[in-house]
Amino acid sequence: MRFTREEIEAAQRTVRAAMPPTPQYAWPLLAQRLGCTVWAKHENHTPAGAFKIRGGLTYFDTLMREQPGVRHAISATRGNHGQSVGFAARRHGIGATIVVPHGNSVEKNAAMRALGVELVEHGDDFQAAAEHAAMLAERDGLHRVPSFHRELVRGVSTAYVEFFEALRDAPPDVLFLPIGLGSGFAAAAAARAHCGVSTRLVGVVSAHATAYRDSFRAGRPVASPVSTRLADGMACRMPVPESVDVILREADDVIAVTDDEVGEAMRILFSDTHNVAEGAGAAALAGALQQRERWRGKTVGISVSGGNVDSSMFAEVLAGG
């Protein structure tokens, strides 16, 4: 998935009208722990606490120019995409309905409601919620916002353009990226092409939701059951074919990390950087830790893609649970 220079620059203007660039820091304790320079891109520092907000901003900017008659949008989420939709919809003065599965993050649900979202709970996983959102869109004549779309990727690419441009004199050898439905990975690949760097991209999935790793290995979309408790942002059962195509073309590798590894990475991010990361937000570090011997002495990038974890869950993780 490629974008023209003008498309990237337009996305940067749209995103920067709502938020400043997020920081990237090379944390000394992480370097000491991994035996290499570690640059963390802090997408947990956006106004919605996650990278997804960028995609919502560009998606709705384009939508309202091309379809100004849209008055209500609907989508499905485990949380961060829903906040992105709610944030952007409110900026344009239109309504938003978000479908989440039962048992979804209490605090992500609260954050969506605070943005004016009408929240609907349906099904036991993201796929069931997405199917229900599609039915409601058809029944009620609502505009359905997909979870993976070119306009979403264009917005998210601004995060990694910031990252690569900040490190243009010494770009990282590798960048670890969590994969939920793949918009973040596709965005990093687009930014890499835009900035002309040769950084390798390694996707990280949950070992309890391996659809994208299985698809990468099979060379085609492969569904997989979901049982992760901690990494809800990566709890994908059915991969998006277009996203799989990008990963097959652009990934150096796709690896899997367990909930235990993710929990350890969450604790390390808090102790070494005093940043709060949700499960998916810590997955990139978990992947880098798993592969530390391969990249010893190199420069490693990690995406801290979000920090929206329920306080009770985070307390349990910090206590070693």
Image (tube, helix red, strand yellow):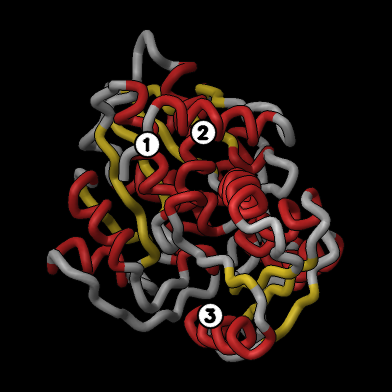
Decide: marks 1, 3 in contact (CB < 8 A)? no
Query: Residue 317 placed where, x, y %?
Result: 62, 61
Residue 3 is labelled as: 1
Indicate left or right for 215 with 142 as reference: left
Question: In this orientation, which residue lies closer to the viewer: 136 or 265?
Answer: 136
Q: CA distance from mark 2 to mark 1?
A: 11 Å
Question: In this orientation, which residue lies closer to the viewer: 19 or 208?
Answer: 19
Residue type at mark 2: give it: Thr
Decide: marks 2, 1 in contact (CB < 8 A)? no
Q: Which residue was labeled with disc 3?
A: 130
Residue in view at x 53 percent, y 80 percent = 130
Q: Which numbered disc, 2 or 1, marks the residue closer to the eye? A: 1
Q: CA distance from mark 3 to mark 2?
A: 26 Å
Q: Which circle's residue, 2 or 1, is located before the other in the chain?
A: 1
Report if residue 278 is visible in the image.
Answer: yes
Q: Which circle's residue, 1 or 3, is located before the other in the chain?
A: 1
Report if residue 277 is visible in the image.
Answer: no
Q: Which residue was labeled with disc 2?
A: 158
